[in-house]
């Protein structure tokens, strides 16, 4: 931990010293800068031991340990207003038996759920267990591809990096044969004509890995009694 002169908190960084016996609390250090700098914390290659010149001590104005750091008016000749730093997130997703079967079926443009052996409800996407009865599920049931729009919302705020013009509709869709509604985007119809009970079908992405959106089938709207339990 190194507290820079004039700072009230310390930062954690590497210290290049000959060995543990050469390090002590209160020793003076200085920054060793990286050969190439980009405006990130990695510009500091490390800290290294450094003795102050004669006549300068830690108690000198502006040094760590001084009663007050030298005042500053807050103006800078070259003020930094923002930085761009690369970020990377690596992760491994292990969906499990039930969701693996669900994902593999999507590659064949099929939607597969699992039926609870107790209550007989079909859950999509499958979770490997019934959320109501708490018992394991294994019987696979193909549902859809058509379904009924149960509830929906109209989105008026454009999301960053999402190439969809607003307004658009996002809703819950109860696929035929399923007892749990999944969510998806509704397209192929003006947003102000979308309604509960609308019958829809999937429009698959290029390559058929998953439905890009759902569009009206042209069928009559479903009766409210047919989907009220899935709201």
Image: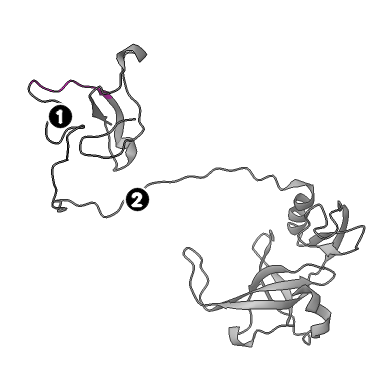
Left or right: where does residue 73 sit relative to residue 161?
left
Question: Could you say which is closer to the camera, residue 229 or residue 62?
Answer: 62
Residue 144: image x %, image y %? 81, 69
Left or right: where does residue 211 sit relative to residue 123?
left
Question: Could you say which is closer to the camera, residue 49 or residue 214?
Answer: 49
Q: Of the residues tagged 2 and 1, which is closer to the observer?
A: 1
- Residue at mark 2: 84
Residue 185: image x %, image y %? 63, 72
Q: Tell which circle, 2 or 1, labels the residue nearer the N-terminal end.
A: 1
- Residue at mark 1: 59
Left or right: where does residue 24 sit relative to residue 50?
right
> How many numbered markers are drawn?
2
Q: Determine the image quadrant of residue 139.
A: bottom right
Find numbered disc 2 in the image and state the secondary structure of the residue it sits on: loop
Residue 70: image x %, image y %? 13, 42
Q: Which residues are magenta?
A: 48-54
Left or right: where does residue 149 sit relative to residue 48?
right
* Residue 100: numbered disc: none
- Decide whether residue 49 is among the magenta residues: yes
């Amino acid at each position: 931990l190194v507290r820079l002169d004039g700072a009230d908190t310390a930062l954690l960084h590497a210290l290049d010293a000959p060995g543990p016996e050469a390090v002590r609390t209160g020793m003076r250090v200085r920054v060793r800068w990286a050969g190439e700098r980009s405006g990130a914390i990695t510009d500091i290659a490390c800290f290294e031991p450094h003795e102050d010149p004669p006549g300068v001590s830690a108690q000198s104005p502006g040094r760590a340990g001084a009663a007050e750091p030298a005042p500053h008016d807050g103006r800078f000749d070259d003020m930094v207003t923002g930085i761009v730093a690369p970020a990377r997130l690596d992760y491994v997703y292990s969906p499990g038996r039930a969701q693996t079967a669900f994902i593999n079926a999507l590659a064949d443009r099929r939607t597969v759920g699992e039926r609870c052996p107790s209550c007989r409800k079909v859950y999509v996407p499958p979770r490997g267990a019934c959320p109501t009865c708490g018992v394991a599920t294994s019987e696979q049931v193909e549902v859809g591809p058509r379904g009924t729009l149960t509830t929906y919302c109209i989105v008026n705020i454009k999301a960053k990096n999402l190439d969809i013009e607003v307004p658009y509709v996002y809703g819950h869709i109860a696929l035929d044969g399923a007892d749990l509604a999944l969510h998806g985007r509704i397209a192929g119809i003006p947003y102000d004509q979308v309604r509960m009970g609308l019958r829809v079908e999937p429009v698959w992405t290029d390559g058929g890995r998953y439905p890009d959106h759902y569009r009206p089938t042209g069928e009559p709207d479903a009766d409210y009694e047919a989907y009220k339990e899935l709201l």
